[in-house]
Amino acid sequence: MNDTTNNTFYLAFKDVHPSWSLIGCALIYGIIAIFGIIFNFSVIVVTYLTKSFRGTVNYLLALYSLFELVHQLGHFLLVYNAFSGQNFIEYRLAAMILFIPLIGLGGIVPAMFFTGIDRLIGIAFSEFHDKLKKRLYLALLTVVSVSYGFCFSASEYQNAINDGDQQMTTGSFLDFTKRQTDPFYILRALSIGRHSKRRFHLCSNELQIQIKLFHCRMCLLQ
């Protein structure tokens, strides 16, 4: 959010306690987050409990869902601010509270990217993919994804520190992703499932079920 002294949104709602408009928006975010958490948790549990879900794509889908679950927990800061009538908190404080959820938000990008690349390698270079040391391969992708998420969150926190006390926010992630939206939507083009349904038929029935569950959760978050 820009300097609060010149921000019309802040000026319009800073003295409205409670603001039913903000409460309505926060309620929608909260409900979507609850469903998102349930679906993401379902993907993780199904992947863990099903022995046939031991492929790289299954792990990467579960990793993506874990990042999404952590990110969605952060939506409840907006819910709290709206329902408490507080409406706004310091941007710096919000960045501190959302540090872990922002790691999840940042980790979404590489997890999605690696899922798409893994399917590309599995389709185009199947023999090479089969020879990979799966544990080392997946461990490396996990470390890179977590590191990227940490750097993303740390960068946002540093920006908040540099902005001083002139920034206020409702606690929405939109205030933290204004410069970061393009990578999220560009890399979403690598989402798996669509090509396999049309041409390749490489997925087992169990994997198709997991992918459908994954896409169902994705649709709820769009």
Image (cartoon, grey):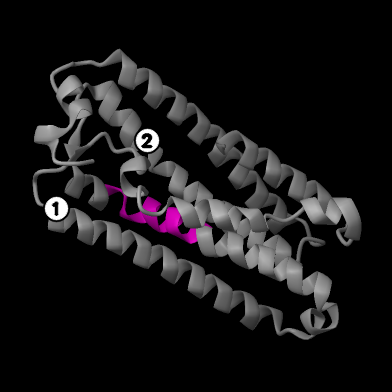
In the image, 141 versus 192, the foreground residue is 192
Residue 26 shown left or right of residue 130 in the figure: left
Q: Residue at x 51, y 47 (%)?
A: 69
In the image, 45 versus 214, the foreground residue is 214
In the image, 151 versus 101, the foreground residue is 151
Residue 97 shown left or right of residue 203 in the figure: left
x, y (%) of residue 49? 72, 55
Residue kind at label 1, given as amino acid type? Asp
x, y (%) of residue 201? 91, 58
In the image, 153 versus 11, the foreground residue is 11
Q: Earlier in the sequence, mark 1 or mark 2?
A: 2
Residue 30 shown left or right of residue 117 in the figure: left
Q: In this rendering, is residue 139 above or below 67? A: below
x, y (%) of residue 72? 46, 43
Please state the extent of the stretch shown in magenta in the rendering: 97-108
Q: In this rendering, is residue 121 above or below 191? A: below
Residue 52 shown left or right of residue 73 in the figure: right
The label shown at residue 76 is 2
**Residue 31 appears in the rendering:** yes
State the SS at label 2.
helix
State the SS at label 1.
helix
Which residue in the protein does label 1 denote? 163
Q: Residue at x 60, y 45 (%)?
A: 40
